[in-house]
Amino acid sequence: MAAEGKRREIPQISGLTLWFFRRVVQTYFRRHFRSVMVQHGERLAAARGPVIVYANHSSWWDPMVLVLLGQKLLPARRHYAPMDASALERYPILKKIGIFPVEMATARGAGQFLRTSQAILEDGGVLWITPQGRFADPRAQPLGFKPGLGALAARTQATLVPLAIEYTFWDERLPETLLRLSEPVRIEATTSHEVATEQLEDALSGAMEALKAAAMARDARAFRVVLRGGRGSGGLYGLGRRLRSEVTGKPVQVDHTQREEAAVPWRKP
């Protein structure tokens, strides 16, 4: 009966809806970004057992990043994420891809989050969390985590992987999505929720600082490409350049600035 109760806590994922949503996510990124690039993707791809990925939360794009990264780096695992119950009611399709509701700032909501999260982890799912619980500029410190992640980490003995996210313009018309996965964190069962939260904040802050330095360096070779997006100036001007190339037989330089990238883009392990 206990096992049956835990299964009821786990959100049901529709394979067809998830396939469709992943296609939409990739289309969105290709349309709106030059590329999605990651540092140390192997740190997540190699993770075994209960896994929690926790990230900073600066943009509407963040949930789509989590969907894309789960698909690319851990394609064989099922992925889940909590969302404010009132916000989730506005996007009911998300309930079919592993998003589950949590009542914010209530004792009942905290208990609900812990029960559902533990059931997911025990069943082999991967949990993705933005523990700030709000939009926050990536330069803002301290990060100000809600207490739920620290409590969950001490209870489950899961591997916690910090994920830093930045959206930045380099030399092209479209921005870059830059990601960095930091060294996994383990929280001992005897650790208090407050100390666990502090340790997890410190780990993510370090990942964000390292990603900020890489973003400022503008060196694509420091990353591996997860997904390529739009290139060139676009619009009528871009179309005219391509047509002229067809007529003259001369190659067109699509990018504003030629750049070197890592020799091997990200591939499924």
Image (tube, grey):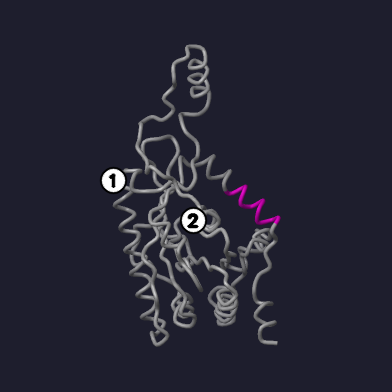
The magenta span reads: 16-25
Residue at x 44% of width, y 72% of height: 159
Residue at x 52% of width, y 27% of height: 235
Measuring from the top left, give residue 27's x and y in whole percent.
58, 43
Residue 246 lies, with reference to residue 199, above or below; the image says above
Measuring from the top left, give residue 158's x and y in whole percent.
47, 75
Please tell me in which quadrant of the rendered image residue 110 appears. bottom right
Measuring from the top left, give residue 149's x and y in whole percent.
46, 75
> Given the current orientation, which residue lies at the most extreme top position?
248
- Mark 1: amino acid: Ala
Residue 261 lies, with reference to residue 51, above or below; the image says above
Decide whether the magenta segment is chiefly helix, strand or loop. helix
Describe residue 150's horizontal placement relative to residue 86 as left or right.
left
The front one of 103 and 149 is 149
Q: Earlier in the sequence, mark 2 or mark 1?
A: 1
Circle 1: element type: helix
Residue 242 lies, with reference to residue 2, above or below; the image says above
Q: Which residue is disc 1 drawn over?
A: 217
Residue at x 59% of width, y 81% of height: 108
Mark 1, residues whose alpha carbon is within 10 Å: few (<14), some, or many (≥20)?
Answer: few
Describe residue 99's horizontal placement relative to residue 36 as left or right.
right
Closer to viewer: mark 2 or mark 1:
2
Residue 23 part of the magenta-drawn span: yes
Please tell me in which quadrant of the rendered image residue 262 appears. top left
- The quarter of the rendered structure image containing the N terminus is bottom right
The front one of 128 and 102 is 128
Question: Distance from label 2 to label 1 (Cα)?
Answer: 28 Å
Circle 2: element type: loop
Q: Which residue is disc 2 drawn over?
A: 269
Residue 265 part of the magenta-drawn span: no
Measuring from the top left, give residue 157's x and y in whole percent.
46, 79
